[in-house]
Image: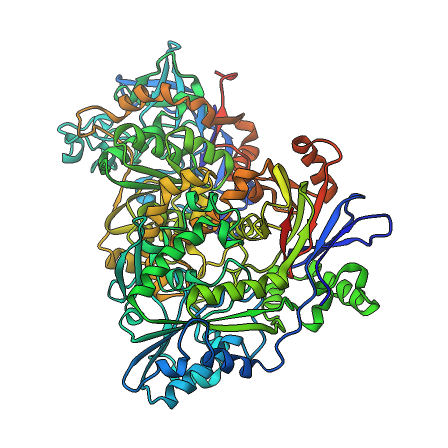
Amino acid sequence: MRPGAVVEVDRNTPPTLFHYGEGFRLERLPLGSRIIYPPDPMDPIGHPERAIRRALTKPIEDDPLKDLLRPGMKLTIAFDDLSLPLPPMASPDVRQLVIEEVVDMAAHAGIEDIQLIAAIGLHRKMTADEIRHIVGDRVFTAFWPDRLYNHDAEDPADNVQIGKTSNGEEVWLNRRALESDLVVYVNLTLVPMDGGQKSMSTGLGCYRSIKEHHTVHTLLNSNSYMHPPDSALHHSCIRQGQIIEDAVRVFHIETSLNNHAFPAIANFLQKRETDWTTSDQAAFYALKQATDLAPPDLKRTMFHSMLAPYGMTSVQAGQVDKVHDKTLEAVRSQMLVPVEGQTDVVTMGIPYLGPYNPNSILNPVLVVCLGLGYLFNLYKNKPVVREGGVVIMSHPTRYEFHSVHHPSYIDFYDEVLADTTDSAEIEKRYEKRFAEDPWYRQMYQQSYAYHGVHPFYAWYWAAHALAYLGDVIVVGGERSTVHRLGFKAATTLEDAFEMAEQTVGRYPSVSHLRTPPLLLAEVE
Amino acid sequence: MLALTFDRNIPAYALVKAAGGRPDVATSPLALLHLEDVEPPKLPGSDWHRVHPQVSGICGSDIAAITGHASFYMDPLTSFPFIPGHELCGRLDDGSRVVVQPVLGCAVRGIDPPCRMCAEGRIGLCENVTEGEIEVGLQTGYCHDTGGGWGELLVAHESQLYEVPDALTDGAAMLTEPLACAIHAALRTGAQPEDTVLVMGAGCLGLLTVAAVKTFTPPRKLICVAKYPHQAELARSLGADLVVAPGEVYQRVRFATQARRVDTIGNLLEKRPVLLGGADLVFECAGSASSLSDSVRLARGGGKVVLVGMPGKEEVDWAPIWQRELQVTGAYAYGVEANGKRTFDLALELAPSLKLDRLAGPFFALEDYRDAIEYAMSSGRLSAVRVAFDQRSEA
């Protein structure tokens, strides 16, 4: 595997690819800028089914799964939802492979009471097809819909408070999981933020427990939440997870993937520009032409139908924390890129997809979440951009929302951001109202809407960056929308650099995060 | 004298109706409205006065008549030909400035004892509008004998005249009449302090309704639907807590009232969602079928819809009115309000604080009526609120 790299821009450097929503831009970065490239994909495990069986029979600090299964027991298998991985994985999804193995073992042990729960937390419910894609046809046909379903964080009968942490944080859990003799959690970890104790406490929790750590205060003190040891968010999840472990027997299974995020048709996205072959260049120009001309809906359909040829790089099972440590090692070895020092400016292209818009629209609030939440936080030690520096993002940032998936996002944009963009003010004045709005609740429970409070979390995700940065500039964004978000709009990257000089001075140092595929900058 | 006259004429009506409101057709020689040299109206009695219109507004109801969109219901309550113009500021022969309260009720018609409605002060509902010493007509501007603001002279009974305070310009005074309509609508309906009130439309009447509701019956939240930026700005300055665009009204009202919204999926014939919940009170100030249809869906169950703008023969789905047990009521004209005050007095007291000058204009000479009518028909798009005729140089 070729490791990640930091490449300095010189006269021979070809134009650099910037993601731009459902499109692309080729930009000339100033001489001396550095481009941070992710490592190439790690070689995947050759026989994933065999590796899964090995993990289940030789778990970490736990008994083999077979020994935990007995006839007449109540078994619940919970699994991560469609927010992972991005883009969705080409079949078979690793969760399918793990779940099939667990179900086979349970059937062999004579267990009849098996239920599978999609641990969606406050995410939108998945459609039947989306669940089928994750669990595979065999499991879907056998269990859907009575014994395979989405968690409902708003059904009072389905959620139980099981205690409080030493910090007074409420801990709630899905009733079926709590009343089970064994919960097998099937995780997929794409970035270090995922997995571990966060899986159950968030995925099978409800607003009252999730709000304990999804706060502005917690996120301001998570530097970064992509590095759990430095993340107040994760510390809270761990406290809650320990209460859950005391209340219910959990067997935790985690998987990690390489970063082979794009299929052959878009292979150039996977490569550094200097590595582009003639056919890559042709593919790029063809796709660029198409995306420049096609209407947004058509582009979205095209992009969201893309499935990633991810390969599994590790699978481990057993006790949650021990398993997660091992998973994080695998994830870091795929993502980590050593970076020397910070720069005044960081540029990033915002792609069409984030965790909260599979088969949907990356609305303006999610643009902020993806750029200043996820991508900004892809660091260890300290951000790539210096404190008071500038982030330049490229995205069309149109006033576009998915009315079924994101109804509360529309109101968040129109009502809340029209009033203030200050995260703490927003949390204080608006969060409760959105969280308790009966219509959002109904849309979450009976339709496919994210929970009413979800746009707040998307906004808080960027709270650390918003407090840390001197300025944010969006290249190619719809001016009125960018201004509503509290940022500056620039037509070209050159304009953006000129605007940035007002904040960071002339001739700023510049880093470009060439992602996705994802990377984790270890900044020294 | 020079005046714009409106006559009943079936071929002309058919023409303007068929033209779909095209201003060039509605003001053509073949249309219903003509600029003519006519006999000045005669004083019907000693208690009548000659009024020289200074400025006179082009109201939505005037446009509806000119373009053939007014309801035939008004026909038997009108005497033809007539000189339009019922929003005006004029001067008496002695030079004093007046506004004319245009309703032609029992007092104006010399009928004593008055009908039961006039006796109650509800002169807009006068039952004697076909009787008395003048021709049929609900208002000045729709009666053959009185003349109207779009001519060089009209006659008005002394009970119709209100002195204009110095604080008001002619343009602001001209808007006393629509302001009185808005005040009457607000007081007749009586929003409660805990209510969410929605004003549909931010033309002249919508904006003045915002001001009237805010002043006389301030609710918990006052929302105005405005199509154009200048309307939104004016609505905010006149007291709207929230101004929303027509395309986002269901979303914003749902949020403001914490209603639940049920969208129609896959029905190409009906895109409007249903709100379970909604505004306590809706003032419909546009008078269009679309706005009426929205109004009855945006009012909560058991809520009230008040028609302030003049509707015509509009197609509206009655199912929401039935299912939501709505009270749909009209608010027409003015008179004496429940507090014992005449609506025009209340309007003249309130007007100076509203800075109504910003709503008046641009002004046109009578001779330029084609331009004026065309401008008035596109006033929202052209950032105007109340286009008017200016006869001050001729006075």
Q: Specify whether residue A401 is in view.
A: yes
The foreground one among A171 and B388 is: A171
Q: Residue at x 44, y 48 (%)?
A: A232
Q: Position of residue A187 (x, y in %)?
A: 47, 69
Q: Position of residue B169 (x, y in %)?
A: 43, 17
User: In terms of image quadrants, where is residue A454?
Assistant: bottom left
Q: Residue furthest right?
A: A12
Q: Position of residue A56 (x, y in %)?
A: 46, 79
Left or right of B165? Residue A49 is right
Q: How is the image coloured?
A: rainbow
Q: Residue furthest front?
A: A61
The foreground one among B129 and A94 is: A94
Q: Position of residue B141 (x, y in %)?
A: 37, 32
Q: Specify whether residue A492 is in view.
A: no
The foreground one among A74 and A488 is: A74
User: In terms of image quadrants, where is residue B83?
Assistant: top left
